[in-house]
């Protein structure tokens, strides 16, 4: 049997498998016209898992994260990390001017810690979560794949104006298709495939994502702190979690002023960052971040300051770097620990007190607080400019 005959036979077997599954009650997620499976890509799919970090993440960063990288991404779909892909999407808008009451936050990695918890919060899957996990099922039951395939079936012109059917207005209606509703979505909006209102993925980019989804969307390799970061993390966590009242107040001060920072340790890789968080678990154990909404909310009777590796892709909107080193720790000691002042009682977390830094940190000498703020003036300025730009107060 020739190679061509073998490939033809393999395609027929795959088609027969799909027909058999349908006959046994498997509900197709798209119409017949749209249910095209890229069998050629399945034939050339590598036997080993495609690396998320080395192959998939670069494509997502280049073509997807520009729209799906922030807290308020369309359909709350964050493609800046594998956790965002597993969480899926939600029809609930993060920001809604017509909404009167606040809603529960949906911060990735904070407000829910598992896929089941996100499903309880109304997020629907983008990847196959069914009992059948063969390559064809992984594609058929993946909204992400169907969105990518829809774009391939209806490619965007390389020149000229966008079709009027492609709505790019700022207040356009949000449509968050699920596996059950995708057939109707594709029929009504055939030009709304992903990337939305942008050129198609290249053949290589498309093949990488399709074959990765067919493999079951394997996650990234486990990451550990770099050799130079690990001992610094240990020193900083020991410093921040000292038990005396003066140190507890100073650690609270540092946390509330650096809660939005992407902390970078000296002599570590340029793209390795950490977040200062409050955790239920002490140093040496897996971090379990306390999901408070504001940094001055009550974290409970017992908590620990921890340094959590920041894994998502970097986006300028929320990337504000702050450098920590042994020299920086020594400077903090000079400003906050060595001066002679007494902390007789730690301030509580009642809103009228906790929200007022002049009341909370009255015991810390004003000159120490001033020098600390002056030392981090660049960090504060960058954060302020980004915040003003985001809400439209800068040209």
Image: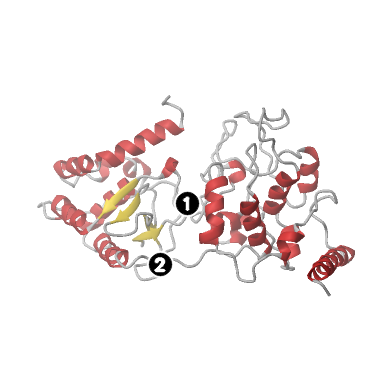
Image position of 341 with respect to 8: above or below: above
Which residue is depicted at the point 36% across and 67% down? Answer: 282
Rendering coords of residue 100 (x, y %) = 57, 33
Which residue is depicted at the point 41% across and 26% down? Answer: 394
Q: Which is more toward the observer, 306 or 168?
A: 168
- In the picture, measured across the screen, residue 187 lies left or right of residue 321, that is right
Q: For the N terminus, give its image quadrant.
A: bottom right
Rendering coords of residue 189 (x, y %) = 76, 38
Rendering coords of residue 8 (x, y %) = 83, 66
Give the quarter of the image for residue 212: bottom right
- In the picture, measured across the screen, residue 94 lies left or right of residue 371, that is right
Give the quarter of the image for residue 378: top left
Q: Which is more toward the observer, 199 or 370?
A: 199
Rendering coords of residue 125 (x, y %) = 67, 55
How many other residues sit within 10 Å of disc 1, few (<14), some (14-19) or many (≥20)? some
How many other residues sit within 10 Å of disc 2, few (<14), some (14-19) or many (≥20)? few
Q: For the C terminus, give its image quadrant.
A: top left
Q: Which is more toward the observer, 217 or 306?
A: 217
Which residue is depicted at the point 51% across and 60% down? Answer: 54
């Amino acid at each position: 049997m020739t190679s061509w005959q073998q490939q033809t036979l393999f395609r027929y077997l795959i088609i027969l498998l799909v027909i058999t599954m349908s006959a046994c009650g498997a509900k197709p997620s798209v119409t017949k016209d749209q249910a095209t499976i890229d069998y050629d890509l399945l034939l050339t799919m590598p036997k080993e898992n495609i690396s998320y970090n080395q192959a998939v993440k670069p494509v997502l960063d280049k073509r997807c994260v520009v729209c799906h990288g922030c807290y308020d991404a369309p359909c709350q779909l964050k493609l800046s990390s594998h956790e965002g892909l597993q969480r899926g999407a939600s029809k609930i808008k993060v920001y809604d001017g017509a909404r009167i009451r606040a809603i529960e936050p949906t911060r990735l990695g904070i407000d829910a810690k598992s896929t089941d918890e996100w499903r309880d919060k109304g997020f629907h899957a983008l990847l196959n979560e069914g009992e059948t996990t063969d390559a064809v099922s992984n594609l058929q039951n993946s909204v992400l794949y169907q969105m990518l395939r829809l774009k391939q079936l209806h490619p965007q012109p390389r020149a000229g104006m966008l079709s009027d059917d492609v709505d790019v207005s700022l207040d356009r209606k949000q449509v968050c298709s699920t596996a059950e509703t995708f057939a109707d979505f594709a029929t009504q909006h055939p030009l709304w495939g992903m990337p939305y209102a942008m050129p198609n993925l290249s053949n290589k980019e498309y093949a990488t994502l399709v074959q990765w989804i067919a493999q079951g969307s394997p996650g990234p390799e486990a990451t550990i702190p770099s050799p130079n970061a690990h001992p610094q993390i240990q020193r900083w966590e020991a410093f921040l979690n000292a038990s005396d009242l003066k140190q507890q107040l100073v650690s609270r001060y540092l946390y509330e002023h650096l809660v939005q920072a992407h902390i970078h340790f000296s002599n570590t890789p340029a793209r390795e960052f950490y977040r200062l968080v409050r955790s239920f678990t002490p140093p040496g154990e897996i971090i379990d971040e306390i999901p408070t909404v504001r940094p001055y909310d009550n974290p409970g009777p017992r908590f620990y300051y921890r340094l959590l590796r920041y894994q998502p892709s970097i986006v300028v909107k929320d990337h504000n770097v702050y450098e920590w080193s042994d020299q920086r720790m020594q400077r903090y000691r000079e400003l906050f620990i060595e001066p002679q002042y007494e902390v007789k009682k730690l301030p509580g977390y009642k809103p009228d007190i906790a929200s007022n830094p002049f009341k909370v940190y009255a015991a810390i000498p004003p000159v120490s607080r001033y020098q600390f703020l002056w030392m981090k003036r660049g960090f504060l300025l960058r954060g302020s400019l980004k915040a003003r730009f985001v809400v439209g107060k800068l040209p």
